[in-house]
Amino acid sequence: CCTTISKLQNNILQMEDAKPGDLVRFKGLIGAAHLNGAIGNLIRYLEDQQRWAVRTEESWEIVKAKPANLELANKSNPIHVFTNPLTGEEEYMQPAATSMPIPSTDPSDISNDTASLHQATLDAFDQRKGGVVISCGDKYMLAIEFDGPSNGGIVGEMVYVDQDRKAQNVVRSRGCARAGELGRNFLMGETIKYVDTADEGAFFGLLFRYKRDTSTQGYIDMKSGLKLFRVTIQR
């Protein structure tokens, strides 16, 4: 009995030092016993409910748990909590890394008309690239991850930064110097073709063309922080 009380008191003292971003392990849950032993990130302490809001590591479910039902796992996985400007909803993600320039070992193609930009996208797919990032200066970009062919065209997932103030805010909130860096984040792990244009008319002509054949995926891409769309590209 005394040992149990001592362990409980020690756990409560540990959780008093906890802060948002700390990794914790669930324990002693009854109504959600399936979570016992699972790992999660502390989001914030809810004073009025005397519970922590915890994002589970595996499913990203948000669970409210008493401090007595949590124990610190380690403190090496801080997260960033912010209101996503595209949705108005809170998002929980790793802080953005320092600004990552596009590598000089993969030079960008330069195209200055919509038809050439579209052809560069098709070429990237035909060259078996994993995706394409099309940038217009530092402010605008669209990035597409290819999924495969479909009815003579291409299907994939797309994120973009246009003139919308909310999208521009995502670039700043992620600590990026260029919008194109978010495209690189989105396609992390893929072999990417980079295409640059100085012609805003050409860029937005391509973006509007692709947007005609998109449908929202209904969620945010966590690597870039941008709204994710399903896109079909016609040849």
Image (cartoon, helix red, strand yellow):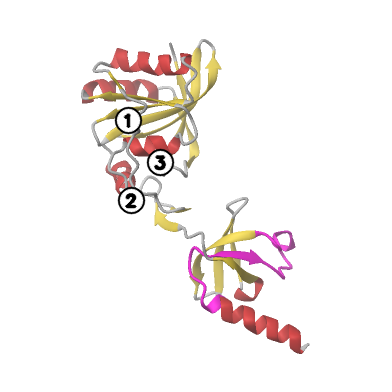
Disc on res. 51: none
Mark 2 and mark 3 residues within 8 Å of each other at the beta carbon: no
Image disc number at residue 226: 3
Q: Left or right: 76 with respect to 144?
A: right
| Residue 104: mark in rendering | 1
- Marks 2, 3: nearer the viewer: 2
Q: Amino acid at mark 1?
A: Ser
Q: Say which of 103 and 97 sits in front.
A: 103
Find out whether residue 1 is within the magenta segment: no
Q: Secondary structure at mark 1?
A: loop
> Does residue 231 lie above or below 27 as drawn?
above
Q: Position of residue 77 (x, y in %)?
A: 51, 59
* Circle 3/circle 1 CB separation < 8 Å: no
At x 32%, y 32%, the residue is 141
Q: Specify the label residue 173 is tagged with.
A: 2
Which is more N-terminal, label 3 or label 2?
2
Q: Nearer the viewer, mark 1 or mark 2?
A: 1
Looking at the rendered image, the quarter that the N terminus falls into is bottom right
Residue at the spot 28% in from the left edge and 33% down from the top edge: 140
Q: Nearer the viewer, mark 3 or mark 1?
A: 1
User: Crowding near pointer 1: few (<14 within 10 Å), some, many (20+)?
Assistant: few
Q: For residue 32, what is the image quadrant?
A: bottom right
Q: Residue at x 64, y 65 (%)?
A: 25
Report the span colored magenta: 15-38
Graded by Cα atoms within 10 Å as few (under 14), some (14 to 19) or many (20 or more), the crowding at tag 3 reads: many
- Is 127 situated left or right of 108 in this image? right
Which secondary structure is most common in the magenta stretch?
Answer: loop
Give how far across and how far down residue 11 sits, in percent.
Answer: 63, 78
